Image (tube, rainbow, N blue to C red):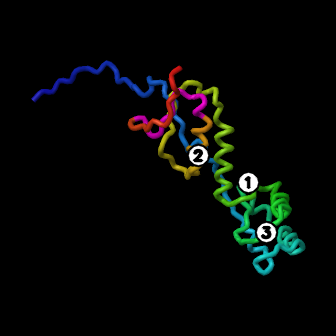
Amino acid sequence: MDFTFAPVDSIVNKVAQSGIQFLDPDSFYTPGTRISIDLAQCLWQGMVLREADFRAWVRELRAEEFQGAYVAVHCSADALVPAWAFMLVAAALSTSAALVVHGTADDLERLMTQRAIDDKINPTDFMDAKVVVKGCGHHPIHPSFHAALTQKLTPVVGSLMFGEPCSTVPVFKKAKS
């Protein structure tokens, strides 16, 4: 049995020709060590932050353990912790940590996500564009990413979709004027 195949002139990549711009959530992930410091461990009788004891604890922090890390400083106990306590920790880590925030690990990720969007997205680059935000990635993406990105892009894009080229979910389409 003889098989004859017709020659193929060319394979056309219709996705490439569509002018769609793809945004990969992985490109917004900031790699690095995350550290969470809970000041509840520093409270006297689990309720009060004593300045002298706290200052001694802060002096014992080993800055090299925080080198280049992203640090969240919070208190899980139901106690009033003065603002200066968070300032002391931030001051102690200011030369070693990449970032110190007052909040939980979740607050830290939310802030880092927003900063990455602000740093990497120039809205004018997406003027009237068709944009697809990829659905899958290799890095953990904070749940706030998609809402923050949508808020940044909807004033300028022609359309915004979520998913993969073969299966997108329409999110926003600019009204025709």
Looking at the image, which is closer to me, 122 or 97?
122
- The mark found on residue 145 in the picture is 2
- Give the x, y percent position of residue 86: 81, 61
Pointer 3: residues within 10 angstroms few (<14), some, or many (20+)? few
Kind of residue sitting beneath label 2? Phe
Q: Which picture quadrant has residue 116?
A: top right
Tell me if label 1 and label 2 are in contact, CB under 8 Å.
Answer: no
Of marks 2 and 3, which one's residue comes earlier in the chain? 3
Of marks 1 and 2, which one's residue comes earlier in the chain? 1
Kind of residue sitting beneath label 3? Leu
**Which residue is at the far right?**
52
| Residue sitting at x 34%, y 21% | 10
Asked if 64 appears above or below 2 in the picture, the reply is: below
* Element assignment for label 3: loop
| Left or right: residue 150 compared with residue 81 | left
Asked if 55 appears above or below 17 in the picture, the reply is: below
- The mark found on residue 68 in the picture is 1
| Residue sitting at x 26%, y 20% | 7
Which quarter of the rendering shows the N terminus?
top left
| Left or right: residue 173 compared with residue 35 | left
- The mark found on residue 80 in the picture is 3
Boundaries of the magenta span: 153-165
Between circles 1 and 2, the one closer to the viewer is 2
Say whether residue 71 is magenta: no
- Give the x, y percent position of residue 161: 48, 35
Say whether residue 163 is magenta: yes
Kind of residue sitting beneath label 1? Gly
Asked if 146 appears above or below 40 in the picture, the reply is: above
Between circles 2 and 3, the one closer to the viewer is 3
